[in-house]
Amino acid sequence: IILDGAVKKGDTVLTFHENQRYDILEVGILLPEKQKTDYLGTGQVGYIFTNQRSLRETNLGETIYSLAENKSDIKPFPGFKPSKPVVYAGIYPTTTDGFDELDKAVNKLLLTDGSINSQITS
């Protein structure tokens, strides 16, 4: 939801908690299918596509604001808390050749659920 202002394709935004910078590639609304729009304004609920490379870069519920705004003027959306893992699992491939395939499979899973965290250990 846009709480104040507007966002449009070509804008640059920052994430409040993670301090990541992204370019807006597309904005739109869901009707229930995606429909591109020129911008999203105050009070509108929609979607944005950015040049974010991985879900690991930001957290679900992150506050996003315009690069043109001063961070000290921004109030993050109330109630934001990074997800805390409550289930831990160790997953290993059956052979040492399978690490790349396992990594691809875990990354696909991460794309479907932003609340999942993964960490590679040796």
Image (cartoon, rainbow, N blue to C red):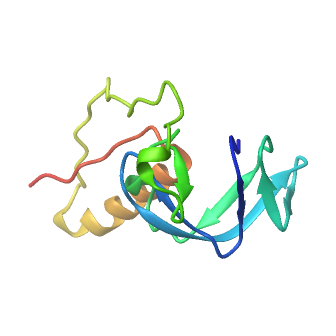
The quarter of the picture where residue 57 lies is bottom left
Q: Is residue 21 left or right of residue 93?
A: right
The quarter of the picture where residue 106 lies is bottom left
Residue 118 is situated, as x and y percent measured from the top left of the image, at: 30, 47
Viewport quadrant of the C terminus: bottom left
Extreme residue toward the bottom, this view? 10
* Residue 108 visible somewhere in the drawing: yes
Residue 33 is situated, as x and y percent measured from the top left of the image, at: 87, 54
Front residue of 111/40: it is 40
Residue 88 is situated, as x and y percent measured from the top left of the image, at: 26, 30
| Residue found at x 47% / y 50% | 109
Q: Is residue 117 left or right of residue 40?
A: left
The quarter of the picture where residue 9 lies is bottom right
Up the image or down, 93 lies above or below 104; here it is: above
Front residue of 12/75: it is 75
Extreme residue toward the left, this view? 122
* Residue 106 visible somewhere in the drawing: no
| Residue found at x 44% / y 66% | 21
Residue 61 is situated, as x and y percent measured from the top left of the image, at: 53, 38
Front residue of 94/121: it is 121
| Residue found at x 55% / y 48% | 112
Up the image or down, 44 lies above or below 77; here it is: below
